[in-house]
Image (cartoon, rainbow, N blue to C red):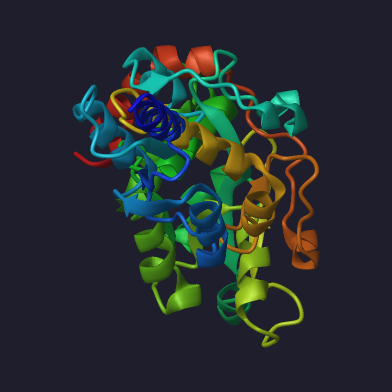
Amino acid sequence: MIKSTGILFLVALFTLLVTACGSDEPGSLIVLTHDSFDIGEEIIAQFEEDNNATVTIQKSGDSGEALNRAILEKGNPSGDLLYGVDNTFLTKALREDIFIKYESSRMEDVPSQFVLDDTFHVSPVDYGYVNINYDIAYLEEHGLTPPKTLEELTGEEWKGRLVVQNPATSSPGLAFLIATVSYFGEDDDYDYLDFWADLKENDLVVKDGWSDAYYTNFSQYDGDQPLVLSYATSPAAELYFSEGAYSTPPTGNMLVDKATFLQVEGIGILKGTQNEKLARKFIDFVLDTPFQEDIPSRMFVYPVNSKAVTPDFFKYAEVPTLPSDIDADTIDENRDEWIDSWTKVVLR
């Protein structure tokens, strides 16, 4: 009887230890993100296999829309992590206190210039430069020379030929608005609002998100506008997707000093998640080289991990020499006012 009781005790103790460790318990994660998120299924599958987990990618519009959703769900999120918070919306996200702090050990491979948040509520994942792209064939066919300054965009030859994104709903749209503030200044004889008013008079086209602007309006995809607000990496992406149809990119970049914007995207664990331990592992995972090296040929931005190797076609992913120089605090102090003023000038 004593021997039987001892065996039962050991079995119960072993069961308790296994349950506490949770090593065999399956887990699940929901990652809220923007519509442009793309990563290889095999990459996500590796995380799932390594962690006995399932991962659901839930796209929620553009970056600004995804963030607004997370804010509305504060404390009771429908997802576990938010991917795509960038340096234009970062301070808004931090002020709303929607993230749990976590500093991944993988951050040691990330150069300090890409650290979004030194409190580590948001970890950087990728970066790119927002600027205007042009359709080379369209310009040649119409006898047009690519603009070299922003001022040229208000000229008659570019009437109705530029499409941008709404800064209230789109992170590249907001990034470009900020770049125009950097370029033209505020309250000058000719400031950023004067520029936008002239663009409106020149039949500027505005879309809510990047995907719609690029794949619907851009003339490269049979739209009517040969100029589109996008990224300096987009020409490299066009070459990649052509599968040999082009030997050089069919689109080019307008790289005007102080008129491009360095955009860094990050990921954070949403406060209220029931899967914090697994969410931490996912952040470690996205900062590791397999995920990082998949980014360039999927989302066509640069990985932040200095050990990640970029593909050969990224030699066409140009890096501006002098992007805009407005710091995050200034953006935070003025972002809403800039958006409101832009809306009154451009959309009303």
Q: Which is nearer the eye, 281 or 73?
A: 281
Image x and y of residue 174, in percent: 42, 36
The quarter of the picture where residue 66 lies is top left
Which residue is located at x 39 percent, y 74 percent?
223
Q: How many labels were placed on the picture?
A: 0
Residue found farthest to the front: 1
Classify the position of the C terminus by image quarter. top left
Image x and y of residue 341, in percent: 30, 26
49 vs 97, left or right, is right
Classify the position of the N terminus by image quarter. top left
Q: Which is nearer the eye, 95 or 250?
A: 95
Image x and y of residue 27, in percent: 38, 45
Which residue is located at x 39 percent, y 53 percent?
54
**Vertical side of 284 occupied by 35: above or below:** below
The quarter of the picture where residue 203 lies is bottom left
Residue found farthest to the bottom: 245
> Does any portion of residue 145 appear in the rendered image?
no
Which residue is located at x 60 percent, y 76 percent?
241
The quarter of the picture where residue 74 lies is top left
146 vs 49, left or right, is right
Which residue is located at x 35 percent, y 36 percent?
80
Q: Which is nearer the eye, 128 or 84?
A: 84
237 vs 24, left or right, is right
> Does any portion of residue 86 appear in the rendered image?
yes
